[in-house]
Image (cartoon, rainbow, N blue to C red):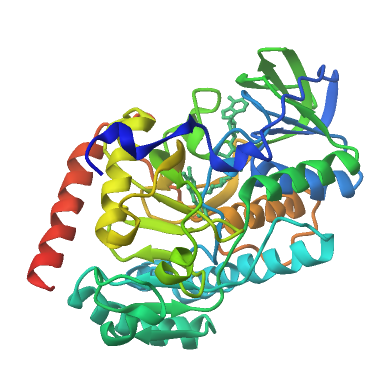
Amino acid sequence: MSSSSQLFHPDFVVEPYWWSETPPVLERNPLPAAVDVAIVGSGYCGLAAGLELARGGLKVAVLDAGRIGEGASTRNGGMVSGGLKVPMAMRATLGEERFSAMVRDSVASYTEFEAFLAREGIDAHYERCGRFTAAHSPGAYRRQEAQLPVLRDLMGLTARMVPESRQHEEIGSDFYHGGMVVEESGGLDPARYHRALRQKFQDAGGSLHGMTGVTAIRRASGGYVLETSSGPLRAETVFVATNGYSGGAWPFLRKRLIPITSFVIATEPLPEGLAAEINPKARMLVDTKRILYWYRLTPDRRRIIFGGRAKFRDVDERDSACNLHAFMSRIWPQVRGVRITHAWKGNVAFTFDHLPHMGRQDDVYYAGGCQGAGVAMSTYLGRRTALKILGAGGEPCGFDGLPFPSHPLYHGKPWFLPIVGNYYKTLDSLERYTGW
Ligand SMILES: Cc1cc2nc3c(=O)[nH]c(=O)nc-3n(C[C@H](O)[C@H](O)[C@H](O)COP(=O)(O)OP(=O)(O)OC[C@H]3O[C@@H](n4cnc5c(N)ncnc54)[C@H](O)[C@@H]3O)c2cc1C
């Protein structure tokens, strides 16, 4: 395609593809004077907690600074997995008991997610289609191979290597050096899933308050007062589930979560037969780079959703779309002429120890930091937090109460991102061109 303007379909919009069918809702409802539990953040994490608490008989309000679900939960790629790259290097530091608990909960986050969808009759176009992680270099393939026993024996996953000579069974591309298939992975429409959670929360008696930003959380007799853009709210218990959008309302989380912008495009419907050629098993696809790309077909298998970090500074969605399209065309030269219909971005929350966290600080509950793999995991952490509040948690969650590192020079703005990002990008390229 000759000019960048030709990349864009005449109907191009800067908006998540998922919103065409399921836009976030306003729900600007007046605040009650007091609730048992106030939840800050209306993504999967906040709503999954709210649902469990409301069903447990508590009066619950979920507050969001924007529209309901306008954060990552309706902007993501809808790729569902256990959400933890097993931190083998941390096994000794964490200790065997903690490590095993994390592995258990990581696996449970996925199995419980599938069970939850089935039990609740949630129609989010979920399909267990498996994931292919493509190796960006021969060395990366060998590292995947070394990880195989961990995935199989420790996590009980159905994982296998696919050599480069057979890679076309998984992806219609010559760009990679083989890769790994994990069957326990699926895809859904993230906004449909969010809508179902929201409706179930309301059916259980919970109240939603969009456009209600929390500006401060103060202790008061009998609990807390939340200062909000719609006035104060008293709550016995507070759960902060603001993840990659955590601001100054509760500095503890802001100092520990690193928001990283992830960019995404969706294409126009592909010509007949092309979808089956480029992704024959309709897998969720991701690569092994540190600065990775992830991609999939839409649930109707007609379009491509392609995401990744196009730039390390906050750029315009249109600019990032050109970069993503260029990279997509390197993987699949067959799609070079396919136009972009949607481009958007959203914040992923990383942590300094690369682990998700839940816990309680100054008696305020929190959860987050799913490192860009939070569809199942943030639902899980939200539910586990609710069970803890209800006093029904059973065995403590492996991600509960871990030391939660910050950095003295970090206050919520990841100034170091261009430096670290470019360093990682250089390592990725070196590996690709030297074969490491
Ligand atoms: C582009 C992108 C692609 C992704 N792809 C995948 C994927 O394919 N698979 C996967 O597993 N995960 C993916 N993720 C990650 C996943 O979307 C998140 O882990 C998950 O949605 C986090 O849910 P959450 O409820 O914790 O946070 P969010 O959904 O981000 O919700 C946090 C909410 O808090 C609100 N908020 C913040 N501050 C305040 C305040 N002061 N007062 C009131 N409200 C406030 C925000 O407005 C926001 O709505 C992706 C994320 C992004 C951004």
Camera-side residue of 150 and 5: 5
Q: Is residue 59 visible?
A: yes
Q: Quadrant of ligand 1?
A: top right
Q: Position of residue 126 (x, y in %)?
A: 67, 62
Residue 425 vertical position relative to residue 252 in the rendered view, above or below: below
The residue at 61%/71% (across/down) is 128
Q: Is residue 409 visible?
A: no
Outermost residue to the left: 434
Q: Position of residue 358 (x, y in %)?
A: 58, 50
Asked if residue 140 lies left or right of residue 39, the reply is left
Residue 31 vertical position relative to residue 97 in the rendered view, above or below: above
Q: Position of residue 140 (x, y in %)?
A: 24, 73
Q: Give the quadrant of the N terminus.
A: top left
Camera-side residue of 334 and 384: 334
The residue at 65%/53% (across/down) is 379
Q: Give the quadrant of the C terminus.
A: bottom left
Q: Position of residue 219 (x, y in %)?
A: 68, 23
Residue 332 vertical position relative to residue 203 in the rendered view, above or below: below
Camera-side residue of 380 and 143: 143
The residue at 76%/47% (across/down) is 197
- Image quadrant where residue 262 sits: top left
Asked if residue 367 lies left or right of residue 352, the reply is right
